Image: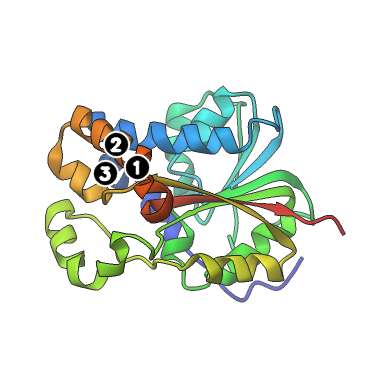
Amino acid sequence: MKEEIFSEKADIETSSEDYAKRFSGEVGKYFLDTQAKLTLELIKDMPHASVLDVGGGHAQLAVPLVQNGYKVTVVGSDDVCRQRLDKFLPEGTFRYETCNLLNLPFEDNSFDIVMAFRLITHEKNWKLQIKEMCRVAKKVVIIDYPDLRSFNIFYKYLFKTKKSFEKNTRTFRSFYRKELLDVFAENNCGNPVFKPQFFLPMVVHRALKNVKISKFAETLFSLVGLTKFFGTPIILKVVKNKQ
């Protein structure tokens, strides 16, 4: 076991009931359904694979993964991070372990798929997090992240407005694709697939409070190619290179 030097606790907030309110109602369900659909499409060729969901106490992916037959292990930085999992998943359908997310207690290549959602963007040591995920992954690593090639380019100007509307939003880091791919390449992962989720900022859809309008708008933006090139957040899949 490696000596623990760092610790990250970003998942405590995302695993809370207060955070879950950000995805309540029809618009929130639309967000989560889109996220789950795109993620499951990325791993549809790996039925019944073992999955490590790092910081997945929010249960946004663990629930659809279990329901679709995947063998799910979730790790969190505190025991409190399993509460929503216990609320939505029957006992025995998943495994949970509390640990230092930057020093995962697993051997190399332990899981077919390793993923982290709502996590990287809130971590100071995100490069180390990616390194650990790549280490324990056997085949695939998947993350979500806010892309700077989007409305996020105006983040520093619009964050106060976003926070005044959403109340419980947090600061977050947006990424250029290349900086993430460089880190993944350093950790023996490549062949990226990018799946942007929405063209309009999620706060705009929350403000609209009309899922029909949101779906119509996003379908239109997708058809004309705006989502592909400027959409965010992005679900990124990379493949572990064979050594």
Q: Could you say which is closer to the camera, residue 106 or residue 145?
A: 145
Instruction: List the residue tagged with mark 2.
Output: 220
Residue placed at 39% from the left, 68% from the top?
Answer: 173
> Which of the 4 image quadrants contains residue 102?
bottom right
Quarter holding the C terminus is bottom right
Instruction: List the residue tagged with mark 3.
Output: 22
Tell me if residue 156 can be seen: yes
User: Residue 53 at x, y = what percent?
Assistant: 58, 45
Q: Is residue 195 above or below residue 175?
A: above
User: Residue 59 at x, y = what percent?
Assistant: 46, 38
Tell me if mark 1 has few (under 14), some (14-19) or many (20+) residues whose alpha carbon lies within 10 angstroms of its own.
few
> Which of the 4 image quadrants contains residue 13?
bottom left
Tell me if mark 2 has few (under 14), some (14-19) or many (20+) residues whose alpha carbon lies within 10 angstroms of its own.
some
Q: Secondary structure at mark 3?
A: helix
Quarter holding the N terminus is bottom right
Task: Give left or right: position of 173 versus 200.
Answer: right
Task: Give left or right: position of 188 versus 205.
Answer: right
Asked whether the beta carbons under mark 2 and mark 1 sit within 8 Å of each other, the answer is yes
Task: Give left or right: position of 20 versus 8.
Answer: left
Three-letter amino acid code at the position of disc 1: Val
